[in-house]
Image (cartoon, rainbow, N blue to C red):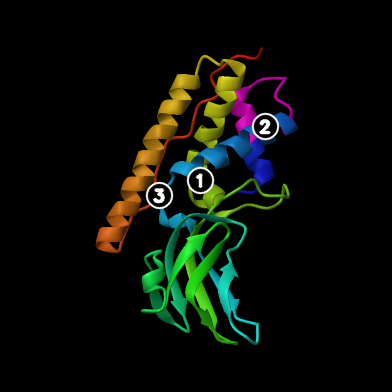
Amino acid sequence: MDYATFRTELKEHLNRRDCTDSRADSFVDKAFLRINRVLDHNVREAIHFYTVAENNGESAIPLPLDAGKKIIEVSVDNVPVEVYPDRLGMQNAYLGYTRRGKGILFNQALPLGTQVTVLYWRNFGRPPLLTETNDLLKEMNPLVLYATLAEAGMFFAHDRTAEWSGTFDRLLLEAISEYQDRELSGYGGSMVVQAPTAGSTDY
């Protein structure tokens, strides 16, 4: 589903003449911020590749702009490295990394040409173009829809706000449970949900 279709669906469920496109976009932005804070699911996995380009080596590399709350794995020349304790006495004991702000900091300088691979959880946002989408809209459309309806409902003091918020909470728990099952078994089924009904009246 592209973003234009998603926004149309959202506005149909809200059924309000005063919900402009720009206002709907603001609700979607808030919904993505909320989902980024609370969603633990492999749909967020992404890979970042970085090659050391400095002749004297580098001990700090930038993370991509969409890097979220979790770094899953860091590999240096295809060898996984661990987080190192942030203590001066251990900085040279073995190669390790820690997260610092918007980047990764290694306890040793990596030589020129070193390939760093970062597996991380990305943050999602509203697609910049109406014709675009993202993996969250494609794979968990109902979760995004109900998160957005809950945000809009609070703004408009809508009588279905509690219902929408409750449905979002349920879908979130289902998604997290699916992720945990997948981590344990290596397999997870798809999330099947019921679409909302456009039962509210116009204002």
Front-most of residues 17 and 40: 40
> Which residue is the site of mark 2?
24
- Residue range in magenta is 8-21
Q: With 170 as the anchor, is 134 left or right in this view?
A: right
Quadrant in the picture for residue 56: bottom right
Residue 110 higher or lower than 68, as above or below:
below
**What label does residue 40 carry, if any?**
3
Front-most of residues 45 and 149: 45
Q: With 92 as the anchor, is 25 left or right in this view?
A: right
SS category of the residue bearing label 3: loop
Looking at the rendered structure, the kind of residue marked 2 is Ala
SS category of the residue bearing label 1: helix
Query: Residue 119 at what x, y percent from top left?
Result: 47, 67
Query: Residue 168 at what x, y percent from top left?
Result: 44, 33
Which of the two discs, 2 and 1, labels the residue nearer the N terminus?
Answer: 2
Q: Residue at x 38, y 51 (%)?
A: 190
Whether the magenta-drawn stretch holds residue 170 is answered as no
**What label does residue 166 carry, if any?**
none
Q: Residues within 10 Å of mark 2 (few under 14, many from 20)?
A: many
Q: Residues within 10 Å of mark 1 (few under 14, many from 20)?
A: some
Looking at the rendered structure, the kind of residue marked 3 is Asp
Whether the magenta-drawn stretch holds residue 19 is answered as yes
Looking at the rendered structure, the kind of residue marked 1 is Asn
Q: Residue at x 48, y 46 (%)?
A: 140
SS category of the residue bearing label 2: helix
**What label does residue 36 carry, if any?**
1
Q: With 120 as the anchor, is 10 left or right in this view?
A: right
Q: Residue furthest top?
A: 203
Q: Residues within 10 Å of mark 3 (few under 14, many from 20)?
A: many
